[in-house]
Image (cartoon, coloured by chain):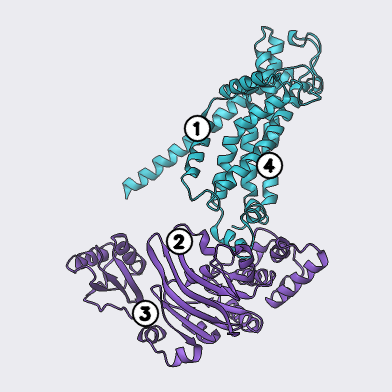
Chain colours: A cyan, B purple
């Protein structure tokens, strides 16, 4: 009995330690970024595009990168959602779930999930060169979409697999097709799960620098067409931290604060939305 | 043959080589309540799921035979499975409201089948909810989630939802087993009212429910059709011993018991160690009867025996504390 109590206590200790490591890691990152970045933050920073000499410490802001990142990650997440939802629905038992191919597809997605984003970037770059495309918003969105699909498709696959069998049977028993059941019942039931998947994928998309380095390029202007090059926050941070000037480096940290706030707002927003969406969900 | 609604002709179903239904020949009468009775695992649900072809969705199910619904062979690949299912509604054991509002649950089927007009939908929803006896309880909160209803109300909602696509046949798979007695009574009353317009097939392991509801009775046992006929005949003068035994509450096992051991007072896992030891001494195919009284033993002993590859033929309550488990030795 004593041994089992000790076991319980030890494992509880380990759990608390693990949670503390995660929390401390996050807090330290936020603290360092805030401490170095907030003093450099100003309204101009988020409402202006870079003026001449911005990277030498003169006038301007990073509106180009904020808008660019939202365009890139937003577009890619939307595109990835459509593709991933179709992939994940197809992986269920009504479609190919009964065959070995489902396992093959899941394995491929898991492997793709582990591929470094620079490889996606290089791959996208090669294709774009072959097609004669310049670095552009479109190229960036496509490569980010590819980057987001594995994470989104697997997350959706897991939530779809958890849909109770009886729920689908109830719908089929009314004479619906697989598609009608998938879109009207299954998707509705997993809406909160879809939101989580979207959030995960968006987070990966907006935070990634390597894949957009070659494919989306960088510019001081806000793009007006899908074929214009586009700036992004991770690259803005990278370039600003790479300069030898302390005031520009501080702006790099300020850009990181902006990126963090965007991710935070989206996460909180989706939590609130998720609570509304669970209203009809069958538990 | 106007009074026959469904004609089941030589139906065989197996799951991964294990036979669930053997050679079923059965006519189900038009606009009556047919009760399918039999112990758990005898193929009642399989038969029901075959009729509306939900069985197609079960992994490893192999189906042979024909089921005729006025000139259409339900089992034929050429038949459109969605139109078959529209004609044959299903009420499942556990109420399964869809993740939407009460109104949308009922309107779901009609909408899928092309009803768009708002007024027509309103009328259908209202009349189906009235028929299911739910309208007065929900008319002020049609837009609230279906999951907020009580389990009994949910089951009536499922009934209304099935009725909304205007089926001809209603299949009910132990529709009251998850409900309290009052809600069960309510569902039973609905079914009796509905039989003037619908052919109803109800699976139940509650023999009293079958007696209250059924016009026609089908007794299945281990995948075989033992007996079928008008309820009055089957209940009062069963032709088969097995039916008589089932109705009288005795599970009659085909092979006789070869050895009986008493494990009263023995706890898990001691009881199945003794049961295993007793099976060791038997020949394959011989039958062991074990008497247990420890509450978890009632589920755990059969499970342990099946895990070892033996066949559990029956579990039956003898009196307040004692249960018997009948096991046939396999390889």
Disc 4 vs disc 3: which is toward the camera?
4
Q: Do the dots labelled 4 and 1 sit on one chain?
A: yes
Element marked by disc 4: helix
Q: Is residue A99 above or below residue B82?
A: above
Question: B237 or B99: which is nearer to us?
Answer: B237
- Residue B172, image x, y percentages: 56, 74
Q: Mark 4 highlights which residue?
A: A270
- In which image quadrant can residue B154 be found? bottom right
How far apart are the alpha carbons under marks 1 and 2? 33 Å
Q: Mark 1 highlights which residue?
A: A111
How far apart are the alpha carbons under marks 4 and 2? 42 Å
Q: Mark 3 highlights which residue?
A: B320
Q: Mark 2 highlights which residue?
A: B61
Query: What is the quadrant of the N terminus of chain B in the image?
Result: bottom right
How far apart are the alpha carbons under marks 2 and 3? 39 Å
Element marked by disc 3: loop
Q: Is residue B87 left or right of residue A16?
A: right
């Amino acid at each position: 009995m004593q041994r089992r109590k000790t076991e319980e206590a030890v494992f509880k200790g380990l759990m608390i330690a693990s949670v503390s490591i995660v929390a401390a890691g996050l807090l330290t990152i936020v603290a360092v970024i805030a401490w170095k970045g907030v003093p450099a933050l100003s309204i101009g920073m988020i409402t202006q595009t870079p003026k001449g000499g911005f990277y030498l410490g003169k006038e301007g802001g990073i509106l180009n990168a904020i808008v660019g990142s939202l365009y890139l990650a937003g577009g890619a997440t939307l595109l990835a959602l459509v593709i991933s939802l179709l992939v994940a629905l197809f992986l269920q038992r009504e479609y190919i779930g009964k065959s070995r191919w489902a396992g093959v597809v899941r394995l491929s997605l898991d492997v793709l999930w582990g591929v470094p984003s620079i490889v996606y970037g290089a791959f996208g770059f090669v294709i774009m060169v072959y097609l004669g495309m310049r670095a552009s918003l479109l190229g960036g969105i496509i490569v980010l979409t590819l980057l987001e699909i594995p994470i989104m498709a697997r997350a959706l696959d897991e939530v779809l697999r958890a849909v109770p069998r009886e729920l689908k049977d109830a719908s089929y028993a009314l004479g619906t097709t697989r598609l009608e059941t998938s879109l009207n019942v299954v998707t509705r039931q997993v809406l909160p799960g879809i939101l989580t998947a979207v959030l995960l994928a968006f987070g990966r998309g907006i935070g990634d620098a390597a894949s957009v380095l070659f494919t989306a390029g960088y510019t001081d202007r806000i793009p007006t067409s899908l074929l214009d090059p586009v700036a992004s926050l991770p690259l803005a941070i990278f370039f600003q931290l790479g300069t030898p000037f302390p005031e520009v480096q501080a702006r790099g940290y300020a850009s990181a604060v902006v990126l963090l706030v965007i991710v935070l707002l989206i996460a909180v927003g989706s939590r609130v939305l998720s609570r509304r969406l669970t209203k009809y969900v069958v538990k | 043959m106007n009074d026959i609604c469904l004609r089941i002709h030589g139906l065989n179903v197996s799951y991964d080589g294990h036979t669930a239904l053997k050679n079923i020949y059965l006519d189900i009468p038009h606009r009556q309540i047919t009760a399918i009775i039999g112990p758990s695992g005898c193929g009642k649900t399989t038969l029901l799921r075959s009729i509306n072809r939900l069985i197609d969705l079960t992994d490893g199910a192999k189906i042979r035979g024909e089921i005729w619904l006025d000139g259409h062979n339900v089992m034929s690949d050429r038949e459109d499975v969605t139109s078959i299912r529209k004609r044959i509604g299903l009420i499942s054991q556990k109420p399964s409201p869809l993740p939407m509002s009460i109104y949308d649950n009922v309107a779901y089927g009609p909408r899928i089948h092309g009803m768009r007009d708002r007024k027509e939908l309103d009328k259908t929803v209202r009349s189906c909810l009235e028929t299911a006896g739910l309208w007065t309880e929900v008319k002020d909160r049609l837009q609230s989630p279906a999951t907020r209803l009580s389990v009994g109300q949910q089951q009536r909602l499922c009934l209304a939802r099935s009725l909304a696509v205007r089926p001809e046949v209603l299949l009910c798979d132990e529709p009251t087993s998850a409900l309290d007695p009052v809600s069960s009574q309510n569902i039973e009353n609905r079914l009796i009212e509905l039989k003037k317009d619908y052919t109803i097939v109800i699976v139940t392991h509650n023999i009293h429910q079958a007696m209250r509801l059924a016009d026609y009775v089908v007794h299945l046992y281990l995948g075989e059709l033992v007996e079928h006929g008008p309820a009055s005949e089957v209940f009062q003068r069963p032709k088969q011993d097995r039916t008589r035994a089932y109705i009288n509450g005795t599970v009659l096992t085909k092979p006789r018991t070869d050895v009986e051991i008493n494990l009263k007072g023995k706890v898990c896992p001691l009881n199945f160690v003794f049961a295993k030891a007793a099976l060791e001494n038997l020949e394959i195919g011989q039958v062991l009867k074990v008497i247990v009284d420890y509450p978890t033993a009632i589920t755990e002993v059969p499970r342990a025996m099946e895990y070892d590859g033996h066949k559990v033929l029956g579990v039956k309550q003898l009196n307040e504390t004692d249960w018997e488990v009948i096991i046939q030795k396999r390889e």
